[in-house]
């Protein structure tokens, strides 16, 4: 079974599972890993200006030979040079990625645009990119409630996603943000979804993941991916290992969690707050 397809509030469809080009691939040549991911069956590629590897991602997209309409390409705005427009910035990324448009264009972080009026102006620039056909959908990343509220006050186009670190150990702290996002139809796009396994050696959900992995003949990582699917979120993950690509794609072959199992993970996750990335997200 292929990963699910989710619907964004603007009507566009997005593959629920994405291959990320940050973390281990940050600042490196991502061409071969992205080619491997595309060959394995990933169709959603998550890039960013900040990762400093868009050109190699573009090489992989071109080398794959896949039709553009069969791919979903995301990239993210980092910072703007003096006098540079959001549209100009995206055009630079499009050239590197070797595509005429991106499916999803995100503001990577609100932090570079904290001064009065800056974030609002950037969002109007994002909307202009959509109007010009440079981006099919637009959204945000690492936005707290106060950041999202600033955008919502001026938005003609509501952000379709907020890409954030999301897993059972941050869910409780994120409650106000998740409620605001749900109110406006904004999807959670998760990075760091496997942090409870990779960064916490033994936490409250560890025995539950172990038990469910055995029950469904899955890995603990696959169980976490199923948990995220149950939450209605998009999952961004990355690896340099071919066997991991297969593991991630196979997560959707059986092993769907029951509502009781999802609730059990939720409840256990509330016993520990652990955030690995973007510490400003603790500041609500």
Image: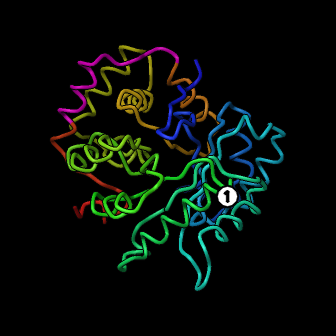
Nearest to the observer: residue 122 or residue 273: 122
Which residue is rendered at x = 50% and y = 32% of the image? 7
Position of 273 with respect to 44 (left or right) is: left
Where's residue 65, x and y in %? 84, 40
At label 1, counting other C-alpha atoms closer than 10 Å, the crowd grade (few under 14, some 14-19, many 20 or more) is few
Nearest to the observer: residue 205 or residue 14: 14
Q: Main secondary structure of the magenta part?
A: helix
Q: Is residue 14 visible?
A: no
Position of 274 with respect to 257 (left or right) is: left
Where's residue 203, x and y in %? 24, 40
Where's residue 240, x and y in %? 62, 46
Q: Above or below — where is 78 with respect to 194?
A: below
Nearest to the observer: residue 6 or residue 32: 6
Q: Secondary structure at mark 1?
A: loop
Q: Quadrant of residue 116?
A: bottom left
Residue at image mark 1: 132
Segment colored magenta: 253-268
Which residue is rendered at x = 42% and y = 70% of the image? 119
Q: Is residue 142 magenta?
A: no
């Amino acid at each position: 079974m292929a990963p699910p397809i989710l619907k964004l509030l603007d009507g566009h469809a997005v593959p629920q599972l994405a291959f990320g080009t940050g973390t281990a691939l940050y600042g490196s040549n991502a061409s071969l890993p992205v080619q491997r991911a595309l060959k394995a069956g990933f169709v959603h590629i998550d890039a960013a200006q900040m990762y400093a590897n868009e050109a190699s991602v573009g090489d992989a997209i071109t080398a794959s030979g896949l039709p553009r309409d069969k791919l979903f390409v995301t990239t993210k705005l980092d910072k703007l040079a003096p006098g540079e427009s959001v549209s100009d910035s995206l055009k630079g990324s499009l050239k590197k990625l070797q595509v005429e448009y991106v499916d999803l264009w995100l503001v990577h972080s609100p932090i570079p645009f904290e001064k009065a009026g800056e974030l609002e102006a950037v969002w109007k620039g994002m909307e202009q990119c959509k109007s010009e056909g440079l981006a099919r959908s637009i959204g945000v990343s690492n936005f707290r409630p106060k950041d999202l509220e600033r955008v919502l006050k001026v938005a003609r186009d509501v952000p379709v996603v907020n890409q954030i670190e999301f897993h059972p150990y941050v869910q409780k702290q994120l409650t106000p943000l998740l409620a605001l996002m749900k109110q406006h139809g904004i999807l959670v796009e998760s990075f760091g979804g496997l942090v409870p396994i990779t960064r916490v050696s033994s936490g409250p959900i560890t025995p539950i993941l172990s038990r469910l992995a055995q029950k469904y003949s899955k890995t603990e990582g696959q169980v976490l991916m199923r948990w995220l699917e149950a939450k209605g979120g998009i999952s961004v993950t990355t690896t340099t290992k071919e066997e991991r690509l297969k593991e991630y794609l196979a997560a959707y072959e059986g092993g769907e969690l029951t509502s009781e199992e999802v609730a059990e993970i939720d409840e256990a996750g509330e016993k520990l707050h652990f955030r690995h990335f973007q510490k400003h997200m603790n500041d609500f």
